Image (cartoon, grey):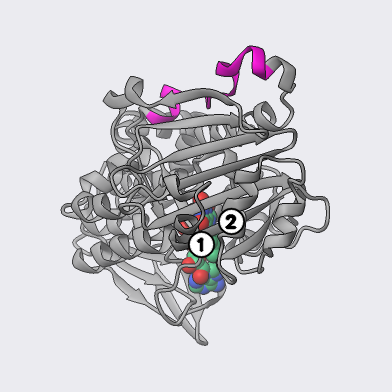
Amino acid sequence: MGSMSAEPLKVLIVGAGFGGLTAAIECRKKGFDVILFEGNKSRRQLGDIISFGSNSGRIFRSWPGVEEKLDPICHHSDGLDFRTYDDEFLCRQTWGAEADWGKRFNGHRGEIHEVCWNHAIEVGVDIRLGCKVQEYFETETEAGVVVNDERIVGDVVLAGDGVRSLARTIVLGFEDKPKSSGYAVYRAWMPTDGLKKNPSTAWLANPEKDLHVGWLGPDVHFLVATLQKGTACSWVLTHKDEADVEESWSAPGYVDEAIKAIPDWAPICHDIIRATPEGALVDWKLVFRDPLPTWISPKRRIALIGDAAHPFLPTSIQGASQSMEDGVTAAVCLELAGKENVPEAIRAYEKIRYPRVLATQRTGVTNRDAWHKADFDYVRKNPESVKLPRMDWVLNFDCETHAYDVYNETVESLRADPNWKPDTTL
Ligand SMILES: Cc1cc2nc3c(=O)[nH]c(=O)nc-3n(C[C@H](O)[C@H](O)[C@H](O)COP(=O)(O)OP(=O)(O)OC[C@H]3O[C@@H](n4cnc5c(N)ncnc54)[C@H](O)[C@@H]3O)c2cc1C
């Protein structure tokens, strides 16, 4: 295997989220020509706290200089304290047992994104801003995009264009629709000035130590993290919400509304929410999509990566990590297949990634239900029952080594079974 052609593979990547950036960096590392198209006119990443498990942490650490830039901006608590909605201490979950699995990175989405973006530029990714892809196309021998009315052609397109993916329509032949998950999340990122003014919350802004506390109640959970020497605080409040299915990271949230979602909760929870400055709160409706029947186009030259292929519930804590694993795996498959065998690489990418992603998506539902549907009499008697399951098969995983290990057998199995389709049962 491997390319006999002197011309490097030309990879077009759509979307500069964590999926697209990772794919672009990894493809550059393998010597491919890479163009990354981003619809936004400037590097702009809305959002607040984002978590990368040790499975994607090892990808960051493989990029020279990146870990050193992430460390000062990320959260470094040694445990998560669980309390009940009426502020009774339940238990502390520590991460020592998984120290050998690698390092986690949790921090502000925009700040972590900027570090990755700069690294992509350093390794020579041609990032084109203000390039919203209008159309995707493919033939037996090439694939491309239409951007600003110009047709740009490559050997393959990796579409990391997010939850509202246009590429998904081409891959599927129909437009899939989001469904309400029945939940929404109030999310805030703020300075700790307001917390410091109130004796009940001042302890959270500890310059010596990052803190992480989760208050749990029936159908609601409230997670608070402090970081950056006690100067920054992020909180998320996941609650029942059947209102609508419009997903937006920019929909404003209101302090009074957030407090109404937890009327009988301990005063400290209300105090933290009240310390949130206007404009720092968003109300994000969580939508759900059924697993797609496939992530790859009919001629096997366009592949969906990241949220375009598989949106995650936040309770899996794996959405961004899995999008990065997609990018790494796609790059390995393309390298091993070479320019002449792109469709084989794209099929192998799907077959290697699909079952792992699906199994990880399931954990989003099971984690959420474990907290929200908990019987609190049982929880008080069995406080350890609220600890997050930490699965080594998710977190202690090196997607790059795995792709190199299984590529040949995957291709052989697909040659033997040309009609293979993913099992989509969630
Ligand atoms: C605005 C926003 C904020 C988020 N904030 C958080 C957060 O705070 N915490 C958290 O855990 N998760 C957050 N997420 C989810 C998380 O970032 C993703 O699950 C994960 O990183 C997957 O990334 P992705 O690269 O697949 O997609 P995305 O991060 O959605 O990136 C997709 C990119 O494609 C671009 N794009 C879309 N269509 C086109 C087109 N036609 N042409 C060119 N470019 C296009 C978009 O502008 C975007 O930059 C957020 C997602 C979004 C969209």
Residue 143 or residue 106, whichever sits in front: 106
Residue 389 or residue 12, whichever sits in front: 389
Q: Judge from the rendering whether residue 396 lies leftward or rightward of residue 172; answer left or right.
A: left
The magenta span reads 379-395
Q: Is 94 placed above or below 307 here?
A: above
x, y (%) of residue 25? 28, 58
Cα distance between the residues tagged 1 and 2? 8 Å
Kindly tell me whether residue 128 is visible in this rendering: yes
The reply to whether dot 1 and dot 2 touch (C-beta < 8 Å) is yes
Q: Quadrant of residue 89?
A: top right
Residue at 75%, 49% (x, y): give it.
261
Helix, strand or loop at label 2? It is strand
x, y (%) of residue 320? 46, 49
Q: Judge from the rendering whether residue 187 lies leftward or rightward of residue 404; answer left or right.
A: right
Helix, strand or loop at label 1? It is loop
- Callout 1, which amino acid? Gly
Q: Judge from the rendering whether residue 304 lies leftward or rightward of residue 341; answer left or right.
A: right
- Callout 2, which amino acid? Arg
The residue labelled by disc 2 is 187
- Is the residue marked 1 within 8 Å of ligand 1, measured from its CB? yes
The residue labelled by disc 1 is 47
Q: Is residue 380 magenta?
A: yes
Q: Judge from the rendering whether residue 292 lies leftward or rightward of residue 155; answer left or right.
A: right
Residue 30 or residue 214, whichever sits in front: 214
Farthest bottom residue? 149
Q: Quadrant of residue 274?
A: bottom right
Residue at 61%, 27% (x, y): give it.
88
